[in-house]
Amino acid sequence: MKPVRVRFAPSPTGYLHIGGLRTALYDYLFARNQGGRMILRIEDTDRNRLVEDATPKLIRALETMDIRIDEGPAVGGEFGPYVQSERLDIYHEQADRLLEAGHAYHCFCSSETLTQMREDQQAKGEFVKYDRRCLKLSAPDIKSKLESGVPHVLRLKMPDDHRFVFDDLIRGRVEMDSSQSDDQVILKSDGFPTYHLAAVVDDHFMQISHVIRGEEWLSSTPKHIWLYNCLGWDAPEWVHLPLILNKDRSKLSKRMNDVSVESYLEKGYLKEALINFIALLGWHGADDRELYSLDELCREFSLDRVSKSGAVFDLTKLDWMNGMYIRSLPPETILERVKSYFLAQGIDLQNDSRTCRMISVARERVTLLPEIVDYCRMFYHKLPLSESDQDTLGSDNSQKVLNYLQSILEHNYPQTDEEVDHIVKATGEDLQIKGKQLYLPIRLALIRQPHGPDIAGIFMILGQDEIMERLREAIQ
Ligand code: GLU
C-alpha cells in the first residue's frame, strides 16, 4: 500500500466556506487516521477569479479550526512549491509530452467562433462540445499560425466511443461514456494550465494517494483518468464526497454555503461545534453518537462510513450542538472565547473566580456566545424595572425583607453558597415570610428581574460591595 497522502486544493477565490471546510476536514481526518500526510495546495491558475489575500486567509482559517497542514505554502515540504502559479514549467513540460504523443492539439478558435459553434449545436439539439475543427489543421498551417502569434490553447483529445469505468471509494463502481466529455482545454492562451491538467500533474508529482473532493468534480474524473493514461501514470484512489443539501434536499443555498467559516465563528459558534457538525455532514460513527472532539474524530473516521447520498445542513442541529459545547467546555475556555464580545460592549472581562462563576451560570441558558453577554447585562447594569416590579419592590413586605437582610449582611457577610442560602432562609424564618414573598423582593433588588440565577450565584457574581449597594438603592 502506498503511504496515505491527501491534499486540500482550494482555489484562492474567496473565503473558506462550509463545503471547503468539509473537504479539508475529511482530508485531515483521513490523513490522521491513517498516519498519512495532509497537503495544502493552492490552485490559482484561473487568474480572473483570484481574490487578493484569499490564500493567507484560507491558511489562517484552517489554523483557527485546528486543521494542521503537513506540507503547503506556509510550511514547505519536499514536493513544493505548493502554489500552482509557481509550477508553470512543470505543466508546460507535461503539456509538451501530450502534444508530441498526439494526445493534445493546438486550437486557434476565437471565443466568437466558439460561441457560434455552441449556439449552432444548441439550435440542433446536439450535445455541446468542441467540434475538433482545429484537429484537422495541417502541420504547416499550425506552424504558420504559431509563428504569426495567433492566440491559441491546447486541448486534450478525448477518446471516441470509450467507456470510463472507475472505482470510487464512496460510490463504488462508476461508469461514464466518453461521448459526454469534451476535448478539454488543458493549457490556456495566457500560458496557464487549466485546473484539470494542473491538478493531475500535481497529484502525480506530489504523490497523492487519495483524491478527496466534492461530488461536483465527479464528472471531471474521466478527463483526469484519461490524462493519467496519456501521461503513463497510475491514477490515485477517487473519493467523491456527497453534496451538502438544504433541509428540503435542494443543493445548499449560497446564503448558507457562501458564509465564511470566520463569520460562523464571529456569530458565536465554537470551532469545536463547527468541526463536530461538519464532520457529520456525510459521515457517521459506528453508533448513534453525535458529539465528537477533533481527536476522537481523527481516531474514529473512516471512508467506509461516508454516505453517498446528500448530507443535509441543518442549522437547528448546529445550534443545538453549539449549546452543548458552550456548556461542556471548561468555563475558562468559554471565558476566553467571549472576551471580545464583552469588550465590544465596553466590558473588559477579568480572569477571576467571580467572572468564571458568571460564565458558568450564563452558559446554561444560551446557544451562541454573544447571548452570554446579553444574559450578563443584569450584572453590569441596573436594568429598568417594570412598573409592577417597582410596586412590588416598594411594598411593605419587600421593604421588610430587604431591611432585615441588609441588617444581617452588615454584620455577617456570607462567603459561600451555603452561607448565602442559610442567611436567606433565616430571614424568611425570622420574618415568617416564605416562597415568592421572600425571593421576589431579593431578586428584584439584586438583579431587577423576577427570574435569573439562584440567589447564592447572584451573591458570588456581584460581590459584597455591589450587593450592598443594590440593596441600599432598593430600600430607598
Ligand atoms: N481547486 C478545486 C476547487 O476549487 C479543487 C478540486 C479538487 O480537489 O480536485 O475545489
Image (tube, grey):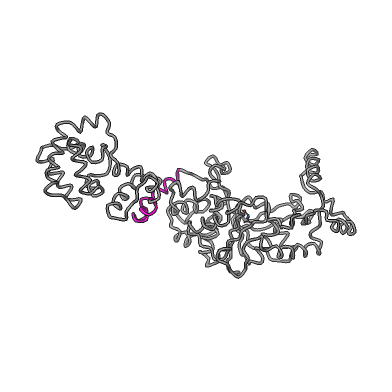
- Residue at 30%, 53% (x, y): give it: 356
**Going by the image, does 316 lie left or right of 470?**
right
| Residue 324 forms part of the magenta stretch | yes
Give the mark count. 0
Please identify the quarter of the rendering in which residue 83 is found.
bottom right
Percent position of residue 27, x then y: 55, 59
Q: Look at the image and tell me in which quarter the C terminus lies.
A: top left
User: Principal SS element in the magenta part?
Assistant: helix
Front-most of 352 and 344?
A: 344
Name the one closer to the observer, 9 or 355. Answer: 355
Q: Measured from the top left, where is residue 15 in percent x and y?
A: 56, 51
**Residue 299 located within the stretch drawn in magenta:** no
Residue 8 at what x, y percent from top left? 58, 59
| Towards the viewer: 256 or 109 | 109
In the image, residue 212 above or below residue 473: below
Position in image of residue 383 (x %, y %): 29, 37
Q: Give the quadrant of the N terminus.
A: bottom right
Residue at x 47% of width, y 54% of height: 275
Segment colored magenta: 316-338
Residue farthest along the front direction in this orientation: 346
